[in-house]
Image (cartoon, rainbow, N blue to C red):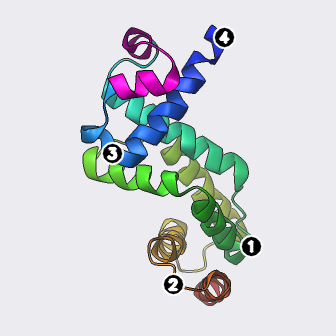
Amino acid sequence: MMAADTPRRILDAAADEFAERGLAGARVDRIAERAGANKQRIYAYFGSKDQLFDRVVEDRIEQLLDAVPFDAVDLPGYAVRLWEFNLAHPSLVRLLLWHALERPGVQLAHSVSSHERKVAALRAVRGDDGWPADRLLGQVLALVHGVTLAPGPDPEHVRTDLHRAVSRLVG
């Protein structure tokens, strides 16, 4: 194993540990063991366990943003692609839920800047149609998160229903 790979191994091991156990239940010694690194390296690279947790969540958000680019013109298609990513990466959903529970009020830079870019893109596409872009985006994301957490037995129906619901929402 190369030393240059160590931060990535730590992030990946920490993502598994935090997704399984949350911030409070995760143990740095287990992360170190999974990553093939020592605890001192973890603290040297990431500071505290809280900082490592935040960095893990940001890392996974970066992966989402790379894989599912926002499309202000096709919000129904974007919603479906976001839901499909969530299904393929259930640990991200768990990490986000843990973060909301255990780090309330802690804003993640990638999440905030991504949200601002999406709102600006919606404003550029929709203009002033009487529905503030930030609230519209919130409603679209609420639909995606809702079907992610309670998807129903048939994914094809969920996909179709989500597309239909967002289509109706954005008119």
Name which residue type carries label 2. Gly
Would you name the residue on which mark 2 appears? Answer: 152
Label 2, residues with CA under 10 Å away: few <14, some 14-19, many ≥20: few
The answer to whether residue 55 shows anywhere in this view is yes
Residue 163: quadrant of the picture: bottom right
Which x, y percent locates residue 142?
47, 72
Relative horizontal placement of residue 92, taking residue 121 as reference (left or right): left
| Mark drawn on residue 74 | 1
Which x, y percent locates residue 61?
56, 46
Q: Which residues are magenta?
A: 29-44
The answer to whether residue 109 shows anywhere in this view is no
Q: CA distance from mark 4 to mark 1?
A: 43 Å
Q: CA distance from mark 4 to mark 2?
A: 44 Å
> In this rendering, is residue 101 above or below 129?
above
Quadrant housing the N terminus: top right
Would you name the residue on which mark 4 appears? Answer: 2
Name which residue type carries label 3. Arg
SS under mark 4 = loop
Label 3, residues with CA under 10 Å away: few <14, some 14-19, many ≥20: some
Quadrant housing the C terminus: bottom right
| Comes first in the chain, label 4 or label 1 | 4
| Comes first in the chain, label 1 or label 2 | 1
| Comes first in the chain, label 4 or label 2 | 4
Q: CA distance from mark 1 to mark 2?
A: 24 Å
Residue plotted at (34% across, 25% down): 28
SS under mark 3 = helix
Number of callouts: 4
Would you name the residue on which mark 3 appears? Answer: 21
SS under mark 2 = loop
